[in-house]
Image (cartoon, rainbow, N blue to C red):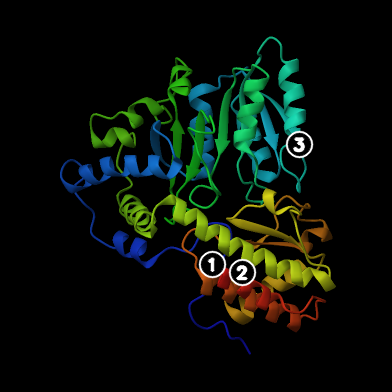
Amino acid sequence: MSLAHGRNYLAIPGPSVMPDRVLNAMHQAAPNIYEGELVDMVAGLIPDLRTVARTEGHVAIYIANGHGAWEAALSNVVAAGDKVLVLATGRFGHGWGEMARALGAEVEVMDFGNRSPIDLAQVDTRLRADRDGDIKAVMAVHVDTATSVLNDIAGVRATMDAAGHGALLMADCIASLGCDRFEMDAWGVDIMVTASQKGLMTPPGLGFVFFNDKAAAAQLDRVSNYWNWAKRAAPDYLYEYFNGTAPTHHLFGLRAALDLIAEEGGIEAVWARHDRLAQAIWAAFEVWGNAGPLELNVAEAAHRSRAVTAVRIGAPHGTALRQWVEHKAGVTLGIGLGMAEPEDPAWHGFFRVGHMGHVNAHMVLGVLGVIEAGLQALDVPHGDGALAAAARVIAEG
């Protein structure tokens, strides 16, 4: 018998759970795109986006997913033949590098594996060896959605400064913005990319590039009209934000999402909520792992994201558990990405839990309860007391 009949819960690392207020805000007739309320609303989004990113810099909005934001950032500052250094801790670090290569850049990848953060000592050695300053940009993913590794972006900037290197620092915050602490200006990030469907709690379809004056000054002489961030960041008319027709209903949703962040007490309060909920999830998984094959992908808590948790459980348990919790209990978990090739039987030994954006204590505890039911139903060995451990963390909050 299935107990999945009811409202399904999407516990994947994006798209995240959409608040009813966001969905309701989008459920309206199309507005006037030339003048009136929409024009004022879009202008009001910009300072609120800056607040979430902790920057006084520029904001460009694209009708795109995160991959589009990747390309937008690269298209403005990286020309064919330019050299970029990619610091990879999972599939999405490699993916951004692959996009740069497709655009003609010379891409060097420092691969730190799937379980560890960027090794700043190795980065320091590489940058000091670049005596001629050939590296134009250093690209790093703040949280790699595939591995749940949280990287020290402020440390990357400090390493670049200590080495006396003038490259642009580009950060991917697609998974982390609005979930893990991120301080664009204080951390010295020149370009940051993100998207709407994770911590910003809005359906997929909006990509964002934040950039400072240093990055603006590094803009290429020739950038395609669509990717060019100049007019998008300083438009005279509404259509110039988007190089054409505005994504009207996504903007209505984004407005509601930013209002929810402000009403919670601002981004600091949102970070604190994500931190507490993530700790509850980690506590449960650590107890389950005391007597079975399950383990968190990232061993040290300081290197774990507050937005997504990647889990190792061994084949075939990962796929079996995902299928059981979805079909029997209405909870969808994320697949493992980049841990093994899909044709490798080991691919079935991983899963991910998304806990980003519009999540609260009962949602997290519900997911954990369903996972425990799945472990029991499938006879996967696991430690006892995981839900109690998670509840204690919640109670301490």
The residue that disc 1 covers is 397
Q: Label 3, label 1: how many angstroms apart (C-alpha)?
A: 37 Å
Q: Amino acid at mark 2?
A: Val
Residue 257, given in percent of the width and then of the height, sits at 37, 56
Which residue lies most toward the bottom here? 1
Q: Secondary structure at mark 1?
A: loop
Question: Between residues 52 and 144, which one lies in front from this camera angle?
Answer: 52
Residue 132, given in percent of the width and then of the height, sits at 68, 9
Q: Is residue 136 left or right of residue 126?
A: left
Q: Is residue 362 left or right of residue 233?
A: right
Mark 1 is surrounded, within 10 Å at the Cα level, by few (under 14), some (14 to 19) or many (20 or more) other residues, namely few
Which residue lies most toward the left here? 36
Q: Secondary structure at mark 2?
A: helix
| For discs 3 and 1, the disc positioned in front in the rendered view | 1
The residue that disc 2 covers is 393
Contact flag, marks 3 and 1 (Cβ < 8 Å): no
**Displayed quadrant of residue 373:** bottom right
Vertical position of residue 288 compared to residue 182: above or below? below
Residue 71 makes an appearance in the image: yes
Q: Label 3, label 2: how many angstroms apart (C-alpha)?
A: 34 Å
Residue 102, given in percent of the width and then of the height, sits at 62, 29
Mark 2 is surrounded, within 10 Å at the Cα level, by few (under 14), some (14 to 19) or many (20 or more) other residues, namely some
Residue 204 makes an appearance in the image: no
Contact flag, marks 3 and 2 (Cβ < 8 Å): no
Mark 3 is surrounded, within 10 Å at the Cα level, by few (under 14), some (14 to 19) or many (20 or more) other residues, namely some
The residue that disc 3 covers is 111
Q: Amino acid at mark 3?
A: Asp
